Image (spheres, rainbow, N blue to C red):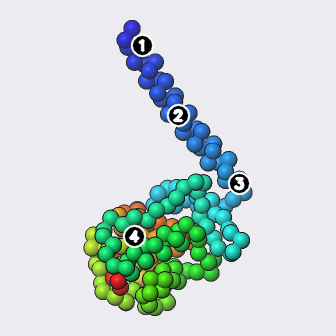
Amino acid sequence: MKTWHKVAGGSTILTTVVLIGIVAYVNWHATVPSNAPVAVDRASHTRMSKQSTSNGRSNSAMNNVVIKVVSSSSVNTNAQRKVMSTVQQMLSSGIPKSMDASGFVQQVYADAGVTVPRTILEQSQTGSMVEGKSQLQAGDMVFFGLNGNNPTTVTFDGIYVGNGMCVALTTHGLTTISLQDSYWGPRFLYGRQVL
């Protein structure tokens, strides 16, 4: 008799969990129009709809979800705090459609009162070298080699935000990227510290 109660109780719990998952799935899909372009954030495997606002900015939005950038390393300068704040603001409100990866990096630093060059190549030669992922600090620039023929050539950059994550403007929009991701991790080359 006790075994029957354990099976019945376990089935009830499993059924409840499954129903909660179905309700969450249905609610998500009900809020995203079926014709909306959809991107998947490689770092978190999160489905995001692409939306455009009236001011010409592009947003990656998920219904009632707030993305908060929190650094695991201490943010100890006003410039670092401003960089982190600007990144958070851009993740929330979007960026101009005409901006590219190095333009995003340049704009974030400009908002923090720090001048960096415009191109990825020039940015990759600015500040002091940070060779390993474990030495990165919040606000450091991070560089990647995405050219399969020459993987050690810098072709992409973003801003490190702590916890092994960076924020960068990809072809999928402004997104948070894990430096442990199977695509991005092996393509990480180094960081540069300018703060």
Question: CA gap, disc 4 to disc 3?
Answer: 32 Å
Q: Which residue is mark 2?
A: 18
Residue 186 image position (x, y, % from top left): 37, 69
- Which label lies toward us, 4 or 2? 4
Q: Are marks 1 and 2 in contact (CB under 8 Å)?
A: no
Query: In the rendered image, which quarter is residue 132 located in?
Result: bottom left
Residue at image point 37% right, 79% down: 78
Q: Which residue is mark 3?
A: 33
Callout 3: SS: loop
Residue 56 image position (x, y, % from top left): 68, 75
Q: Are marks 3 and 2 in contact (CB under 8 Å)?
A: no
Callout 1: SS: helix
Q: Which mark is residue 161?
A: 4
Residue at image point 67% right, 51% down: 31
**Which quadrant: the N terminus?**
top left
Question: CA gap, disc 4 to disc 2?
Answer: 35 Å
- Residue 6 visible in the shown view: yes
**Above-or-below relation of 163 to 26:** below
- Which label lies toward us, 1 or 4? 4
Callout 4: SS: strand
Q: Which residue is mark 1?
A: 4
- Which amino acid does the dot numbered 4 rest on? Val
Question: CA gap, disc 3 to disc 1?
Answer: 45 Å
For marks 4 and 3, the one nearer the N-term is: 3
Q: Which mark is residue 62?
A: none
For marks 3 and 2, the one nearer the N-term is: 2
Instruction: Classify residue 87 as left or right of residue 134.
Output: right
Residue at image point 71% right, 54% down: 33
